[in-house]
């Protein structure tokens, strides 16, 4: 049974004074898989791999980032990429990707297996609608979308339109026992957008998560803000896991990502400092 993000932050199950929300994808792939691809097409194997990292690192909450799953499948699915390129309309590529039933069913199956087997609390992370819109733009097949000027012209209306597609897709995951939904607003494969948008542009997602009584947060390079909450998460920098940082940023909880290059002995030592 999942515990809400707010409950976990208030009383970290690890006994730490400040809850740790951990993104261990890159590190776990380097250490446990020796840089081999994650087993995205085998939900049980992926869940065991995820739990291996979760069991060793013992975060209060672990991040399950579905953007990696979609990147993996886009690389292997030329038919889907072709379907996404059929129209040049803004958002068409993202809408087509999220509407692919077979891919969505596989993603839900993966998420369902993971949450059923998870040894601790899990937060579902997906790109924010604006970031996902920008990251899928080039699949439209239109040269006008290949330059930064077109990306810079995207605004809150485009973000809100995209959030409707994401919200419809998200319903398939919202009933699963995640502790929260996290929208990752860090740029994926392009410069930071000129037009930043906030929760006001993502009302469809806020409505879906509210219906399922889920907390939704926004992650950026500075930390995490939670919708309609004053609690804020601060970034524990990647350099901490390399042994280069000894101070902790102020915040109600810490969000952090262990880099692939981190040395396991150093990581365990740094974990021990988070009391």
Image (cartoon, rainbow, N blue to C red):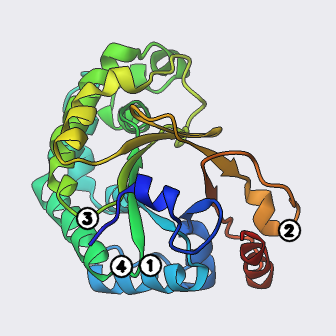
Instruction: Using the image, tell me which numbered label, if any, was put on residue 118.
Output: 4
Instruction: Using the image, tell me which numbered label, if any, was put on residue 177.
Output: 3
Q: Residue at x 26, y 35 (%)?
A: 205
| As drawn, 195 above or below 2 | above
Q: Is residue 79 visible?
A: yes
The numbered mark, 2 or 1, whose residue comes first in the sequence reads 1
The numbered mark, 3 or 2, whose residue comes first in the sequence reads 3
User: Would you say the residues marked 4 and 1 are in contact, meaning their CB atoms lie under 8 Å apart?
Assistant: yes
Structural crowding at the residue carrying mark 3, measured as other residues with C-alpha within 10 Å and reported as few (<14), some (14–19) or many (≥20): many
User: Would you say the residues marked 4 and 2 are in contact, meaning their CB atoms lie under 8 Å apart?
Assistant: no
Where is mark 1, residue-wise? 50
Secondary element at image label 3: loop
Depth order, front residue of 196/144: 196
User: Would you say the residues marked 3 and 2 are in contact, meaning their CB atoms lie under 8 Å apart?
Assistant: no
- Closer to viewer: mark 3 or mark 2: 3
| As drawn, 168 above or below 88 | below
Snapshot quadrant of residue 50: bottom left
Q: Is residue 251 left or right of residue 95?
A: right
The numbered mark, 4 or 1, whose residue comes first in the sequence reads 1
């Amino acid at each position: 049974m999942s515990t809400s993000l707010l409950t976990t932050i208030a009383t970290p199950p690890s006994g730490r004074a400040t809850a740790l929300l951990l993104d261990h994808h890159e590190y776990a792939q380097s250490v446990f898989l020796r840089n081999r691809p994650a087993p995205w097409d085998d939900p049980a194997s992926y869940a065991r791999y995820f739990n291996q990292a979760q069991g060793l690192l013992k975060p209060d909450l672990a991040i399950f980032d579905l953007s990696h799953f979609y990147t993996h499948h886009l690389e292997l699915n030329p038919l889907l990429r072709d379907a996404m390129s059929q129209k040049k309309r803004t958002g068409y590529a993202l809408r087509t990707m999220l509407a692919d039933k077979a891919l969505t069913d596989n993603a839900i199956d993966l998420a369902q297996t993971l949450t059923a087997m998870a040894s601790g609390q899990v937060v579902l992370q997906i790109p924010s609608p604006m970031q996902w819109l920008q990251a899928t733009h080039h699949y439209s097949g239109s040269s006008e979308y290949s330059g930064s000027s077109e990306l810079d012209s995207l605004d809150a209306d485009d973000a809100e339109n995209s959030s409707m597609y994401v919200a419809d897709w998200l319903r398939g995951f919202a009933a699963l026992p995640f502790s929260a939904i996290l929208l990752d607003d860090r740029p994926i494969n392009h410069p930071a957008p000129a037009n930043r948008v906030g929760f006001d542009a993502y009302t469809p997602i806020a409505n879906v998560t509210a219906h399922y009584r889920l907390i939704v947060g926004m992650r950026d390079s500075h930390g995490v803000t939670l919708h309609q909450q004053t609690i804020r998460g601060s970034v524990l920098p990647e350099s901490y896991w390399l042994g280069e940082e000894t101070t902790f940023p102020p915040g109600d909880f810490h969000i952090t990502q262990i880099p692939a290059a981190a040395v396991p002995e150093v990581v365990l030592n740094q974990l021990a400092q988070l009391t």
